[in-house]
Amino acid sequence: MELAVAFIGAFIVGGLLCVAAQLVVDVGRLPPPTVMVLSVSLGAVASGLGLYDPLVKVGGAGATVPLPGFGHVLVQGIIADVSRHGLVGLLGGGLEAAAMGVTAAVLFGYLAALFFNPKV
Amino acid sequence: MKATMQQEQEFKKLQRKHLPSRPVLRNALLAFLVGGAISAVGEGVRQFFLARGIGPEAAAGPTAAVMIFLGALLTGLGVYDEIGRVGGMGAFLPITGFANSIVAPAMDFKREGWILGMGAKMFTIAGPVVVYGLLTSFAVGLVYYILYIPR
């Protein structure tokens, strides 16, 4: 039962974030890459304001898997590091927290591009 | 001939009128379904890590890594393009779409060499995402430091 709620929460939160992004593309007439960049930054700001954590509580992966979750991870990493080490945490904490995602993106991205060729 | 501001504005208005109108509702629904489905798959991966005793905070990293792997693989197989055609931002907003944005140009520009082809073109979209993500989060962190860290 608890598991079902987690999946439904993820579907709804993740789905709604994507709807918002799609509306910005269709109604706001912005190209998808711009919206991808904007959503990471918006996620970072929302995280700083304490608005993103409740979304993660409800949505789980529905909040962390979409790109605003990347901004959230960066900000939470920086805040944790700044709280522990002071000013230097501003430079270290973000990528430290996002290390797995960034490394996986470069590694798996490179390997996939190496082994596969574009379908014409 | 240089167009005046007014002419340019009129042109933009005219252009807007003649652009094909987009099926906004249909696109939104498809984005919801595809983005929701990808998120649910992500939740399945997250639950797998939670069940193995990894805490909710620590589970986000490996979950992202697995989703990136899936996105990269499906892009290589040519499947993710189809998902993107249907789901729009529902396919591109999840981190699997971030992986897609790395693999697709890297494949396309492979023949232009390892460095300026694959190495550089991987980051056509991922680069700006990381750049502005880091800049914004730095600014947010700085505000947090100024407001909340006692000196």
Image (spheres, coloured by chain):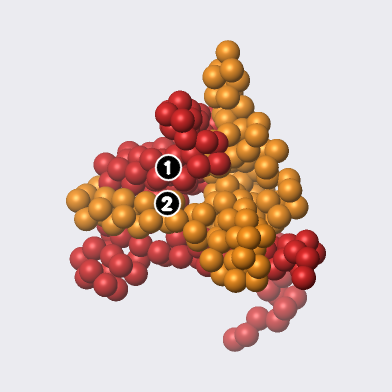
Chain colours: A orange, B red
Judge the density around disc 2: few (<14), some (14-19), many (≥20) Cα neighbours within 10 Å.
some
Q: Residue at x 58, y 47 (%)?
A: A69
Image position, residue B44 (x, y; %): 46, 28
Q: Is residue B28 above or below residue A93?
A: above
The image quadrant of residue B104 is bottom left
Most foreground residue, A26 or A35: A35
Question: Quick one: quadrant of the N terminus of chain A?
Answer: top right
Q: Residue at x 61, y 46 (%)?
A: A21
Residue B62: mark? 1
Q: Do the residues bearing badges 1 and 2 touch, measured as CB atoms within 8 Å?
A: yes
Where is residue B51 drawn, in percent x and y?
Answer: 45, 26
| Badge 2 element | helix
* Residue in front for this viewpoint, B149 or A36: B149
- Asked which secondary structure carries label 1, the reply is helix
The type of residue carrying mark 1 is Pro
Q: Amino acid at mark 2?
A: Met
Q: Quadrant of residue B117?
A: bottom left
Look at the picture and state if B51 lies above or below A25. Answer: above
Work out whether disc 1 and disc 2 sit on a shared chain.
no
Residue A100 numbered tag? 2
